[in-house]
Image (tube, rainbow, N blue to C red):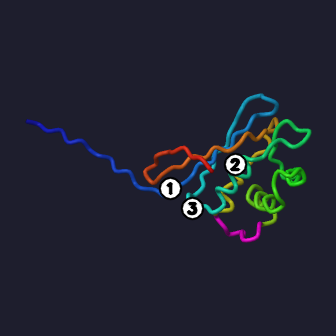
Amino acid sequence: MIEIVKETKTKKKSSPYYILKYEYMIGDADGNTSEKVEVLADNPYLERYVKLLNSLKPLDGKWGIVLDSYEFHKFVEQGQITEDDYKFLNSLMWEGNDLYEGIDEDDEHAWAFCEGVQGETEYSFLVFEGIKLTYVDEDGKKHKTKIK
C-alpha cells in the first residue's frame, strides 16, 4: 500500500501589526481611492490618532474634509479638537512639522502615519472619509477592529 504524505507548510511567525486604510473620495465624487499604511501593534499613538481623525466633521462652510496642513488648525477654532489634539495630529500627519511633546525625530512609531495622509492627487483634491483599521496577527490572519 502506498501512503501519501502531505507536506505541511510552516508559516514563519511575524510580528503583529495593524493596517490603516485611509479612505478618500476623489474631488466632488469622481471616484474613490485609498492609501494603506502598516503600523506596528505596539504603536503608542495608534488609538488616539485613529479616534481623533475619525471624529472630524467637515468644517463650517465645507462639505468634506481635506487633510491639508495649512487649514488643519481650523478644527481647533471650530471646537472639534483641542489645541493639544492638534499638536499631536500635526506632528504625526506631516513630516517636518513641530513635534508633539514626548515625540522625537527618531521615534519610528511617529512616522508610521504620514504616508497615508493625502490632500490631493495629481489632478484633483481628495476628501477624507475615515480610517478603517485591520489587525494582522502573528500568523498573518486579518481581523476587524473596533475602537471603543
* Mark 2 or mark 1, whichever is nearer to me: 1
Q: CA distance from mark 3 to mark 2?
A: 19 Å
Residue 102, above or below 19 = below
Label the magenta part by its dominant secondary structure: loop
Residue placed under numbered mark 3 in the picture: 42
Going 82% across and 50% down the picture, which residue do you hit? 80
Q: Determine contact: label 1, label 3, CB under 8 Å.
A: no
Residue 127: in magenta span: no
Farthest residue to the left: give it: 1
Q: Is residue 6 left or right of residue 108?
A: left
* Mark 3 or mark 2, whichever is nearer to me: 3
- Dot 2: within a 10 Å radius of its alpha carbon, few (fewer than 14), some, or many (20 or more) residues? some
Residue 95, above or below 21 = below
Q: Amino acid at mark 3?
A: Asp
- Dot 3: within a 10 Å radius of its alpha carbon, few (fewer than 14), some, or many (20 or more) residues? few
Farthest residue to the top: give it: 30
Q: Which label's residue is closer to the chain start, 3 or 2?
A: 3
Could you say whether the residue bearing mark 3 is in a helix, strand or loop? Answer: loop
Magenta-tinted stretch = 100-108
Q: Is residue 19 visible?
A: yes
Residue placed under numbered mark 1 in the picture: 16
